[in-house]
Image (cartoon, rainbow, N blue to C red):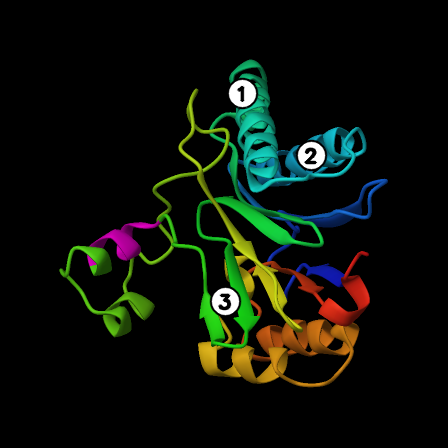
Amino acid sequence: MQTFFQTDKGKVRQHNEDCVGVFTNESQNVLAVVADGMGGHLAGDVASKMAIEFLESEWKKTSNFNTPREAENWLSTFIDELNSKLYTHAESHEECKGMGTTLVAIICTYQFFTIAHIGDSRCYFKDSDGFTQITDDHTLVAELVKSGQISKEDAEIHPRKNVITRALGTEETVKLDVKTLTWEGEDTLLLCSDGLSNKISFEKLEELIYSSNELKLIGNELVSLANGLGGEDNISLAIVKYNQSINQKG
């Protein structure tokens, strides 16, 4: 598997409240994570950094994931534990009151990948059927679109577009979306914070992910484009590319 990740403060924000990481365990399974923190002064930084560091530390203890159930259980267990850690930290540190973070995390094995997410950080997937968003935003406007109250086009310009309905660390318990899909051919995953997805159109994301450029060049161009379009938010991404002929294990 080829991987690349990057985070950028953007053009407007004074601090980067995003945190991102890609980690490989002893069995060459990959964990990719993007977290977009929120909260009071610097508290978003704390939440997203705690999320990445905790999952990285637990990932180092893993070996091979043989079944989707194992991967799904790992993500559910440790993200639930992470939520408790974030909530407890926020309750016991006045400067972190109200902090939280979105999270999109993927375990990639040679046979399948398992995704868990909460909030509006996204995962896109390119396979033989095309390019699609495979996570549902946990936002107010997403709920309004789902219920038919507004259109997708209205959602893009809605004044409450950034209102999140679910996040890690803001409540004692958390509802996580988890699912598993299988690889084929030369599939590609793009994880990103809303600082990227809010600035770059779906069509442009698709065009760049389909390009034959190295992942680093694709990632750098995505960040540059988001900044060129205003860069009002922090920008983070992780890309994982699967090549069946390279990754097939005997």
Q: Is residue 53 above or below residue 90?
A: below
Residue at coordinates 75% horizontally, 83% vertically from top-left? 213
The residue at the point 47 percent across, 82 percent down is 203
Q: Is residue 230 above or below residue 83?
A: below
Magenta stretch secondary structure, dominant: helix
Query: Residue under circle 2?
Result: 55
Say which residue label 3 marks. Answer: 197
SS state under label 3: helix
The answer to whether the residue labelled 2 contacts the one labelled 1, judged by CB atoms less than 8 Å apart, is no
Q: Nearer the viewer, residue 141 or 174?
A: 174
Given the image, on which type of amino acid does mark 3 rest?
A: Ser
The numbered mark, 3 or 2, whose residue comes first in the sequence reads 2
Q: Quadrant of residue 25?
A: top right
What kind of element bears circle 2?
Answer: helix
* Inter-mark Cα distance, 1 to 3: 28 Å
Sequence-wise, the earlier of marks 1 and 3 is 1
How far across and how far down the image is residue 148, in percent? 14, 61
Residue 84 is labelled as 1
Q: Write down the region rendered in magenta.
A: 139-144
Total marks in image = 3
* Closest to the observer, 66 or 181: 66
Locate residue 245, reporting x and y percent: 77, 71
3D distance between C-alphas at marks 2 and 1: 13 Å
The answer to whether marks 3 and 2 mark residues whose Cβ atoms lie closer than 8 Å is no
Amino acid type shown at disc 1: Ser
Name the residue at the right extreme. Answer: 26
Residue 100 position, x and y percent, is 51, 35
